């Protein structure tokens, strides 16, 4: 018998809703060869019992946080660590981020083939304290040295401080040339749009995205041997495709070309499948580095396995219902998407509470959560329907709906 719950409709009236149950798909098995490099940015599980002021201090439940990463590895996904999805710069400070990176790298040692790349930024340098480009360079150097000392691969995150002090594209070229010269293995660059972080508006020295792209491509071409790929998070598939087709033929993780890692949480299915166009194989498809993979991991893994087996139609069948869910989770204000990601983890029993670092569980409304619940069910991503319904009832009661 289907699990049933009463959910509020748009007019506030309670209506019976019957859950469909888990989707008919099977995640990739550990060690299964995929045809796309796929990183999931991972959320952190807050320590809900810690005696702290959550808007000021940060306390992480390390056991639950690492257990979630082990789940992602078991499905063939890599971990993009200490990124925006982990509330980096939005509750998770640099010392805690470095501790998170250390825990994850230690855990990865016991997982054959585990992929980990870690966020390196300048977030310990407050933008208002940055006086020059040299301050930004020193901040990047400090974080890169700390992560590489642990044996970590770098994702070079965008810098709020650099936006504040840079006078032109030449300042970005100088900073990236210096920082990339110190990388001990090819890094993934990250271009995060201002819909995710308003403080990054005008990155690469201009608000004109075409000119900004030209600057980024110039930096990549000049330093290709040090660049694995670039993740762009602009939620604009046409910009991603245009940039993908312009990436150089040298560099990349295998020396066969710099890769595009889609960060488009609206159009990921189409971009990962690719169009086959361009002069190089890397020009015709995107790899993935996505926050939404945290929430849709079973479907993402299963779809990637189907794609690897040449079943493109089945790939799209699995991912198509996840796209409305992702667009809902990432709706404006986009920076609050982490709340939906953690809500999904709670519904599915991967953590015991719905409390977030920095108290960010409060950033979305009850109607938002209700619709998220429906969309997750439609995508086959409520893994334990009875548990999900019980926890949804708890949330409703907390909002005075019983």
Image (cartoon, helix red, strand yellow):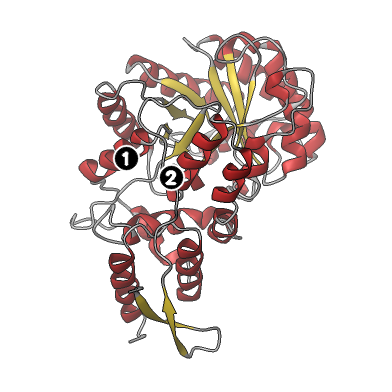
Horizontal relation, residue 138 to residue 310: left or right = left
Residue 401 in view (yes/no): yes
Q: Residue 91's spot in the image, x, y percent?
A: 39, 49
What residue lies at 61% left-to-right and 46% top-to-bottom?
316
Of marks 1 and 2, which one's residue comes earlier in the chain?
Answer: 1
* Residue for badge 1: 71
What residue lies at 46% left-to-right and 9% top-to-bottom?
184
Rendered image: mark on residue 18: none
Determine which quarter of the picture holds residue 188. Answer: top right
| Residues under numbered marks 1 and 2 in contact, where contact means CB atoms less than 8 Å apart | yes
Give SS at disc 2.
helix
* Residue for badge 2: 297
Q: Residue 82's spot in the image, x, y percent?
A: 41, 36
Residue 158 in view (yes/no): no
Determine which quarter of the picture holds residue 43. Answer: top left
Number of residues whose C-alpha sits closer than 10 Å to that of mark 1, classed few (under 14), some (14–19) or many (20 or more): some
Residue closest to the eye, 33 or 211:
33
Q: Quadrant of the N terminus?
A: bottom left
Between marks 1 and 2, how big is the CA–CA gap? 9 Å
Q: Residue 256's spot in the image, x, y percent?
A: 64, 11
Horizontal relation, residue 387 to residue 360: left or right = left
Number of residues whose C-alpha sits closer than 10 Å to that of mark 2, classed few (under 14), some (14–19) or many (20 or more): some
**Tally of numbered tags:** 2
Look at the picture and state if 135 lies above or below 345.
above
Q: Quadrant of the C terminus?
A: bottom left
What residue lies at 50% left-to-right and 12% top-to-bottom?
183
Look at the picture and state if 3 lies above or below 335.
below
Residue closest to the eye, 64 or 360:
64
What residue lies at 50% left-to-right and 57% top-to-bottom?
336
């Amino acid at each position: 018998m289907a699990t049933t719950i009463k959910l509020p409709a748009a007019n506030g009236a309670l209506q019976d809703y019957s859950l469909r149950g888990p989707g008919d798909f099977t995640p990739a098995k550990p060690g299964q060869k995929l045809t796309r490099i796929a990183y999931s940015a991972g959320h952190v599980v807050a320590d809900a019992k810690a005696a702290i002021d959550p808007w000021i201090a940060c306390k992480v439940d390390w056991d639950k946080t690492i257990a979630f990463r082990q789940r992602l590895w078991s499905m063939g996904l890599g971990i993009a660590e200490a990124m925006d999805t982990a509330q980096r710069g939005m509750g998770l400070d640099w010392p805690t981020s470095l501790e998170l990176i250390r825990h994850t790298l230690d855990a990865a040692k016991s997982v054959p083939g585990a992929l980990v790349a870690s966020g390196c930024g300048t977030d310990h340098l407050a933008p208002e304290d940055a006086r020059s480009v040299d301050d930004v360079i020193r901040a990047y150097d400090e974080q890169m040295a700390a992560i590489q000392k642990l044996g970590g691969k770098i994702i070079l995150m965008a810098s709020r401080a650099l936006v504040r002090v840079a006078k032109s594209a030449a300042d970005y070229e100088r900073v990236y040339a210096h920082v990339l010269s110190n990388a001990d293995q090819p890094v993934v660059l990250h271009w995060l749009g201002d819909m995710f972080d308003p403080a990054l508006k005008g990155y690469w020295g201009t608000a004109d995205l075409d000119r900004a792209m030209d600057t980024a491509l110039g930096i990549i071409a000049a330093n290709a041997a040090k660049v694995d790929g670039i993740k762009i998070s602009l939620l604009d598939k046409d910009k991603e495709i245009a940039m993908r087709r312009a990436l150089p033929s040298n560099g990349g993780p295998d020396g066969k070309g710099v890769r595009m890692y889609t960060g488009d949480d609206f159009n990921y299915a189409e971009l990962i499948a690719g169009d086959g166009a361009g002069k190089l194989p890397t020009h015709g498809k995107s790899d993935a580095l996505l926050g939404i993979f945290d929430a849709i991991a079973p479907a993402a893994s299963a779809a990637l396995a189907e794609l690897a087996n040449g079943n493109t139609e089945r790939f799209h069948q699995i991912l198509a219902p996840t796209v409305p869910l992702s667009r809902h989770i990432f709706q404006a204000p986009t920076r609050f998407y982490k709340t939906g990601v953690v809500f999904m983890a709670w519904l599915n029993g991967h953590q015991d509470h719905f409390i977030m670092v920095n108290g960010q569980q409060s950033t979305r409304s009850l109607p938002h959560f209700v619709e998220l619940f429906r969309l997750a069910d439609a995508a086959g991503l409520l893994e334990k329907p009875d548990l999900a319904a019980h926890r949804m009832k708890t949330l409703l009661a907390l909002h005075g709906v019983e």
